[in-house]
Image (tube, grey):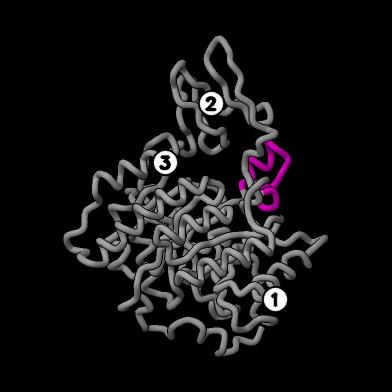
């Protein structure tokens, strides 16, 4: 493809600190119109949503938007100064690429502020047919280094990239230092340790791809069974976890189950059922030039969205006002722990001794 300067010009030129003097944005989930309104009313700078079809990686039954609801949501958000991003973050299927291309056209017609894409072919379609549309690289694209991100900028005019949840703070900073593309990182919510929404394990066990079905543990495949050894959670018959009497039983996902390892060990071998929470890292993220903090949870309730958005709005405002004296308030942490997986949180890959 011809590397037209007009594509690269969508981002700041090399050497310019895109974050200098800019407000760190709070990007919040909207799995429904009520959730969108809760995010907007509690201080989100941006909300992200998806259509009610396979173009959306959170294609849960009963969630997401038709065109009328999106138009309503955009009007509500824009009237209050909030931007709306549309996630078209799955990979088009060979039999029906037109569904994804049509979704890009709908996004433009509806007036979204940006679309979030993972597939290079769809980026090609978007920048060719809608050259003025802002393109954000989805976490589903798994771009974890500056060369990959700069490639998407040069080829398709991508102006923002959402980093995978596998990088340390040092690695995030190294990316920011060598790309003019805006960088968005996850700040709170569930962790996904596989190829960001395209988990081969759950596809194998359930026979359904999270890429097009929107969930790694489809409800129809989930079972809780009471046994003499305790309550068991199973996914399509596969034992995921076993809980003692009185122990909280989480929703069964393969990456967050307890498994036998070796002869006598049983533990969370892949990932623990806990939520990412980076409130304490805000000053560092701000200093290194992170453009936006993303909250996970389009599948969660409007109450969750409102509660988490309110806490993060207050925290970011406090940090922006005085980053050197910022410290997370116990009330903030307590409020987030109430809605965290297992009522506990982690810094995830941001803080780890290995790289």
Which residue corresponds to mark 3?
340
Lower sequence index among marks 2 and 3: 2
Who is closer to the viewer here, 67 or 317? 67
Does 210 appear in magenta? yes
Which residue corresponds to mark 1?
125
Lower sequence index among marks 3 and 1: 1
Distance from Cα at disc 3 to Cα at disc 1? 38 Å
Q: Residue at x 68, y 64 (%)?
A: 67
Residue 189 locus on image (x, y percent): 45, 48
Lower sequence index among marks 1 and 2: 1
| Label 3 CA crowd tier, 10 Å (few <14, some 14–19, many 20+) | many
Write down the quadrant of residue 75 in the picture.
bottom right
The residue range painted magenta reads 199-213
Who is closer to the viewer here, 273 or 327? 327
Q: Secondary structure at mark 3?
A: loop
Residue 278 locus on image (x, y percent): 34, 52
């Amino acid at each position: 493809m011809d590397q037209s300067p007009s594509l690269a010009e969508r981002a700041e030129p090399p050497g310019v600190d895109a974050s200098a003097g800019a407000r760190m944005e709070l990007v919040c989930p909207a799995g429904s119109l009520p959730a969108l309104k809760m995010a907007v009313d509690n201080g989100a700078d941006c909300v992200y949503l998806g259509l009610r079809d396979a173009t959306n990686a959170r294609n849960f039954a009963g969630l997401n938007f038709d065109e009328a609801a999106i138009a309503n949501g955009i009007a509500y958000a824009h009237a209050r100064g909030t931007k709306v991003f549309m996630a078209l973050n799955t990979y088009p299927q060979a039999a029906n690429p037109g569904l994804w291309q049509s979704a890009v056209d709908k996004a433009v017609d509806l007036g979204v502020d940006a679309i979030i894409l993972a597939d290079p072919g769809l980026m090609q379609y978007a920048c060719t047919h809608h050259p003025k549309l802002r393109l954000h690289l989805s976490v589903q694209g798994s771009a974890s280094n500056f060369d990959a991100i700069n490639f998407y900028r040069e080829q398709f005019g991508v102006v923002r990239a959402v980093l995978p949840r596998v990088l340390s703070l040092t690695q995030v900073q190294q990316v920011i230092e060598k790309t003019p593309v805006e960088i968005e990182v996850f700040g709170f919510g569930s962790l996904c340790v596989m190829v960001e929404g395209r988990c081969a394990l759950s596809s194998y066990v359930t026979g359904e791809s999270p890429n097009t079905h929107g969930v790694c543990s489809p409800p129809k495949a989930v079972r809780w069974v009471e046994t003499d050894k305790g309550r068991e959670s199973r996914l399509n018959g596969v034992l995921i976890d076993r809980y003692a009497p009185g122990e909280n039983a989480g929703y069964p996902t393969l990456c967050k189950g307890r498994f036998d390892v070796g002869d006598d060990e049983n533990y969370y071998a892949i990932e623990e059922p806990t939520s990412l929470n980076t409130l304490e890292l805000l000053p560092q993220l701000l200093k290194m030039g992170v453009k936006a903090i993303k909250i996970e949870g389009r599948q969660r309730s409007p109450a969750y969205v409102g509660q988490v958005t309110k806490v993060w709005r207050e925290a970011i405002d406090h940090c922006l006002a005085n980053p050197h004296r910022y410290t997370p308030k116990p009330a903030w942490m307590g409020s987030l722990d109430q809605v965290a997986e297992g009522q506990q949180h982690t810094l995830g890959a941001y803080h780890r001794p290995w790289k």
